[in-house]
Amino acid sequence: MTTATVPIRDQLDLEELDRQVTHTAKMWQKINKITLYTLIFVIAVSFLYPSSALVFGSPWNSSLDNIVSNLPFVTLFVSASFTLILGMREETARWRYGYKALKPITANIQPPSVWGFMVLHYRRFISTTLILIVIVIALVDNRTDVLIIYLLFYFALGHVHKALYVWPYHGVFQRGDYEGGLRRANILWGVLIGKGGYLTTRTSLLLMLGRFAEAEQMARKALTPTKNNPSELSSALSMLGRALQEQNRYAEVLPCYEGAIKLSPGYAPYYTRLANFYLKQESELERAFALVQRALAYSDKPKPNRFLEMFQWVALKGTEARLLALLGYHQQANAALEAGFDALAVEFGPGLADLHLEAGYVSERQRDLAAAQSHYEQAQRLDPNGAMGQQAHLALLTLKQTIEQSTSSPK
């Protein structure tokens, strides 16, 4: 006996969320302009007054006659403090708006405090100020070698951190080595990257493996250590929603996706996942279309070698194609699939499997059962150990039964 799914609709105000995204973008443009103008001003003053307080060994001078010698230091301090306070005020207001959606999930997560925000962003404050100071010192002392070495070290350190963060995914996107990814995402790696990143990464890999019950438990563990980091918390919520959705626990899914979107309203993949929630039930298709359009507006086609971003972008194109096919726009659906396939390299296994799976659904909708079977078989071949391969296998079995019934039925 099958239970009919009850269509459930989210309560998101997409226009309000778009205003927040625009407001946040303008805020960071303002902060970047302040930082740039500060840098120009400090460099100019430092060249005109080489005895400024930023040069090592020069004393702090509080005399009004020589106050100009202290301007670089004062300007840097005021600018860095102002940008931090501005960010705290704006982002805390947005976070509190997002945290209201978390109450149906857990009562243990409270909105972030000012102290929690400062702990999260102290690196931003220190690194921005340190960069400005080192640049000015190097220019004033005519030590371009120091400046070049420092900047190379700073950017190299940033790339090392990014490389460390994606280390567990090495081999996943080319070979579908999910178990290897789980082994690399071990406790020692978690100490380096942080508990929140450790838990969300393992959750992501479990979802790719199709181990949804384990992914649910891991995502729930990630909710508390990520509470002061909206990026990691929204990621954990979105993954929790996906794990619940794949277990057909639809009534529990919406608060997760709503919370993720409210915490990170400018992040396109969360809109895609909510649209997929409706597509799986084939309900609220107009709402799903609005969500896909919003995701397209917030996303840019990434570079081919950026596997994580490309995976998300291709998933969006696949979702768009499936939705357009359900709405009867078959030509546009084929164009979306073509754009996705054109963007992918052959070795990008899971991404291709996901797109072939969506192409199979589109072909079924277009009554091209032979093409659908071909797409499902390719998806299963490309991702034999992952969730996409498992879904393709089930879709292929269902399709073969449909073909057998159609051929055995009397004409």
Image (cartoon, grey):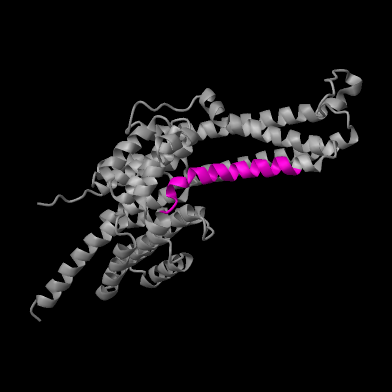
From the viewer's side, name the closer residue of 264 and 56.
56
Q: Which quarter of the picture shows residue 198?
A: top left
Q: Which residues are magenta?
A: 148-171
Q: Nearer the viewer, residue 162 or 267?
A: 162
Which residue is drawn at the image coordinates 72% and 28% (left, top)?
78
| Camera sees residue 83 | yes
**Magenta stretch, overall SS:** helix
Q: Give residue 150's quadrant in the image.
A: top right
Q: Residue at x 89, y 32 (%)?
A: 49
Residue 171 at x, y percent in the picture: 42, 54
Q: Residue at x 30, y 40 (%)?
A: 216
* Residue 139 relative to residue 404: left or right: right
Residue 364 in the image: above or below residue 196: below
Q: With 185 as the anchor, is 36 left or right in this view?
A: right
Please identify the quadrant where the C terminus is shown: bottom left
Residue 167 counted in the magenta span: yes
Q: Is residue 257 visible?
A: no
Q: Residue furthest right?
A: 65
Residue 75 position, x and y percent, is: 77, 30
